[in-house]
Image: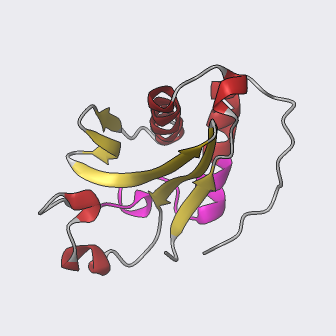
Amino acid sequence: MPGQQMMYVLFNLRRLKIGVRELVTWLEETIIDALQEYNINAYAKPDAPGVYVDDCKVASLGLRVRRGCSFHGLALNVNMDLSPFLRINPCGYAGMQMVQTSEINGPASLEQAGQGLIKHMLKRINAEHVVHTEGFENE
C-alpha cells in the first residue's frame, strides 16, 4: 500500500542456520529497534506476529519459505490512509486497531523508515559488508 515501507527479505535460512520462528523474531526485533531510536515503545506478541504500539499494530509480517529460502517480508505503516483497515479484520483479528509511525512521533517518510530498517537488519545479521541499494521504491 502507498505509505507503507516494505522490506523483502530473501534469505537462505539453511546458510544462516536459523529457522522460520527465528526469522520472524529477527524481523520483529528489527522494527522494534528502528522505532526505539524514536523513543517508541514497540513490542511483539507471541501469539500474533507483527509489531505493536499501545495495543495497535504498526507493522505486519508475511513470509513464505520454500526450499529453505525466505520470500516476502514486512510492511511498516509510515504515512498512509489507514481507513481501508476499518473494513477488514487486519491479520484475521476483529477490531485490531492500526497505527502509523508518522502519528506517534516516528519516521514520517518512507526513506527515514527504510534507512532505520536496513540499519537494524544489518546489525541483526551481523553483515556490515552486505551490499544493498541506496534507493527505496514506493509501492
- Residue at 40% x, 53% y is 60
User: Magenta region: which residues?
Assistant: 99-115
Q: Is residue 78 visible in this depiction of the protein?
A: yes
Q: Quadrant of residue 135?
A: bottom right
Could you say where residue 29 lies in the image, as x and y percent from the top left?
48, 32
Q: Quadrant of residue 28?
A: top left
Could you say where residue 61 lies in the image, as x and y percent from the top left?
44, 50
Of 104 and 94, the residue lying toward us: 94
Could you say where residue 74 lies in the image, as x and y percent from the top left?
51, 52
Eyeballing the image, is 92 above or below 40?
below
Eyeballing the image, is 25 above or below 11?
above
Eyeballing the image, is 66 above or below 104?
above
- Residue at 28% x, 58% y is 91
Q: Residue furthest left?
A: 95
The total number of labels drawn is 0
Q: Is residue 105 visible in this depiction of the protein?
A: no
- Residue at 22% x, 59% y is 92
Could you say where residue 71 lies in the image, as x and y percent from the top left?
61, 51
